[in-house]
Amino acid sequence: MVVSATMVDVKLLGAWPSSFLYRVIWALKLKGVKYEYVEENLFNKSDLLLQYNPIHKKIPVLVHGGKPIAESIVILEYIEEVWPQNPLLPTDHYERAAARFWTKFEEDTSSTFFAFFQTVGEEQERAIKEAKGILRIIDEQGLGGKKFFGGEEIGLTDIAFGWIAGWLRIMEEAVGLKLIEDDSFPHLQAWIENFKAVPVIKENLPDHNEMLAYFKQRREMFIASATS
């Protein structure tokens, strides 16, 4: 493959437990874009991160030609525009709009799942009820039997929802409660298997045991804070 000028000088700042980071990794890998990865310590943020993302001070940050782009969905859109090979959005205008709708739906609803993970008692019960309602919408209306959100090929919306395929299961284990029962959300469960079977995804997932240990530690911290 010929490396163009747009594929030169790409740097990615991230932290290994972050699903937001992996969205960007998957997109870059699917596009065949080479990049330098810089691991950040979220509890001791580097001057580089603060320089490149002074407003939110969060990862991931993509740096292309010395110019930083923050916020994972914004980064995905940027990657799609700069590197058009192996497109992640459909060419059809309506289908592209639908992809953006479901990506926005993910952005608007993901906080409910963090509430499930971070809370206890009645607050967690409310989050569980709301999260299952969101999963039902994804299962029945977002997927409805399709292999991927856009049809037969993985796309930007699948990448946005990719945390469900890995991180949600680990969150469930850490909490000790299941949002996705074995006999529930059949379309979503089929999508999870299809998503994880894509070679780029399969080869670029964090270690399960390391993630579980990390999330259990975080869960204990949240419980201690909530009950203190």
Image (cartoon, helix red, strand yellow):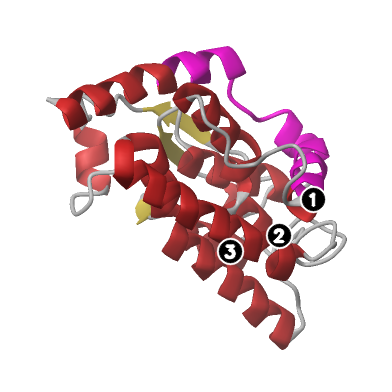
Residue 88 image position (x, y, % from top left): 70, 62
Distance, label 3 to label 2, CA atoms, is: 32 Å
- Residue 222 position, x and y percent, is 26, 28
Task: Determine the residue positioned at 23% across, 51% down.
Answer: 56
Name the residue carrying label 1.
Answer: 186
The nearer-to-camera label among 3 and 2 is 2
Lateral position of residue 42 relative to residue 101, left or right? left
Q: Could you tell me how far apart the alpha carbons at marks 1 and 2 are, in whole angstroms?
A: 7 Å
Q: Which residue is mark 3?
A: 82
Q: What are the residue bounds of the magenta stretch?
A: 189-214
* Dominant secondary structure of the residues highlighted in magenta in the image: helix
Q: Is residue 96 visible?
A: yes
For marks 3 and 1, give the one nearer the viewer: 1
User: Mark 3 vs mark 1: which is more N-terminal?
Assistant: 3
Name above or below for residue 176 compared with residue 137: above
In this rendering, the answer to whether 141 lies above or below 123 is below
Q: Quadrant of the C terminus?
A: top left
Q: Residue at x 60, y 52 (%)?
A: 161
